[in-house]
């Protein structure tokens, strides 16, 4: 158990819909990262938050947005869903202030868009 | 900027044979290097990490990796493969500067043949 909690574990929805994925980082971790993993694209970095503020952006689509709340949990919002958005979405957190610190990953949220 | 290249997207070994998964990195500053393992339908789990304390790093499940600066490599090895080692393996690099981001390789799928 990494200590990172993601909900829901599975989600099936239709094209055009909007979903929200939730992540609770490990206790004490201020940084939260979101990744998308699909068969054809591998592990893609989407976005990072640190203590409520956006720290870095990766290959995140404009239809996607995220935020980190004062209690440090984070949500990834995916809208106008397309078939190609079907993927595993991972949240990870890391020890703050240490570049040598590793990422701790959640179990992921598997999104299926029909 | 940092990057990671994993040579071989698929590797097959016989049970009991040596496992060698290759990772080469690029970094203009001293890197921190990580190997993660992902079992089917699970999140990524840290196998081991290099943080400059020792060039030979031992991890979980009998895996180890050696940091070779002259070759910019951090290959993962295990003397004797077990069926339970079948999984996806990811190499990652992180360094100071550039937002302290993690850069993941494209992954290597390990198959263990009985």
Image: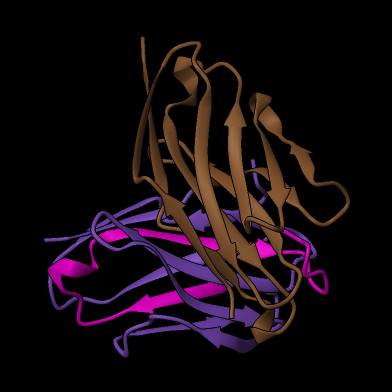
Determine whether, in the image, residue A109 is placed left or right of residue A92: left
Q: State the quadrant of the N terminus of chain B.
A: bottom right
Residue drawn at (70%, 75%) of the image: A71
Decide which of A44, A85 is in the foreground and name it. Answer: A44
Please state the horizontal and vertical placement of residue A66, each as a whole percent of the image.
47, 82
Residue B43 visible in this rendered orientation of the protein = no
Query: Which chain gets the purple colouring?
Result: A
Residue sitting at the far front: B70
Task: Specify whether B60 is left or right of A20.
Answer: right
Q: Identify whether B25 is placed above or below A75.
A: above
**Quarter the C terminus of chain B occupies:** top left
Residue A79 in which image quadrant: bottom left
- Chain appearing in brown on the rendered image: B
Residue B30: image location, x then y, percent? 76, 69
Which residue is at 17% across, 68% downward? A84
User: Quadrant of the rendered structure where residue A111 is?
Assistant: bottom left
Q: Position of residue A14 (x, y in %)?
A: 13, 67
Q: Position of residue A93 (x, y in %)?
A: 65, 64
Query: Residue at the spot x=23%, y=68% of the render?
Result: A85
Q: Is residue B16 above or below residue B36?
A: above
- On whether residue A87 falls in the magenta region, the answer is yes
Magenta segment: A73-102
Up the image or down, A32 lies above or below B17; here it is: below
Residue A5 in the image: above or below residue B80: below
Q: Nearer the viewer, residue B99 or B78?
A: B78
């Amino acid at each position: 158990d990494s200590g990172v909690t993601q909900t829901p574990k599975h989600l099936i929805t239709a094209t055009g819909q909007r979903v929200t994925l939730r992540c609770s980082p490990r206790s004490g971790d201020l940084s939260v990262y979101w990744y998308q993993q699909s068969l054809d694209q591998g592990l893609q970095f989407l976005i990072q938050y640190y203590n409520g503020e956006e720290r870095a952006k990766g290959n995140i689509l404009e239809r996607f947005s995220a935020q980190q709340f004062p209690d440090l949990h984070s949500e990834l919002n995916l809208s106008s869903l397309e078939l190609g958005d079907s993927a595993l979405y991972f949240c990870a957190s890391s020890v703050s202030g240490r570049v040598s610190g590793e990422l701790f990953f959640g179990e992921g949220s598997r999104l299926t868009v029909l | 900027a940092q990057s990671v290249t994993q040579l071989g997207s698929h590797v097959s070994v016989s049970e009991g044979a040596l496992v060698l998964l290759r990772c080469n990195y690029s970094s203009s500053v001293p890197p921190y290097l990580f190997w993660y393992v992902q079992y089917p339908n699970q999140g990524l789990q840290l196998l081991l990490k290099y943080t400059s304390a020792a060039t030979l790093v031992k991890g979980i499940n009998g895996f180890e990796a050696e940091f070779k600066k002259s070759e910019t490599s951090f290959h993962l090895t295990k003397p004797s493969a077990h069926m339970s080692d079948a999984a996806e393996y990811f190499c990652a690099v992180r360094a100071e500067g550039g937002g302290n981001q993690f850069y993941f390789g494209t992954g290597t799928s390990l198959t263990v043949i009985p």
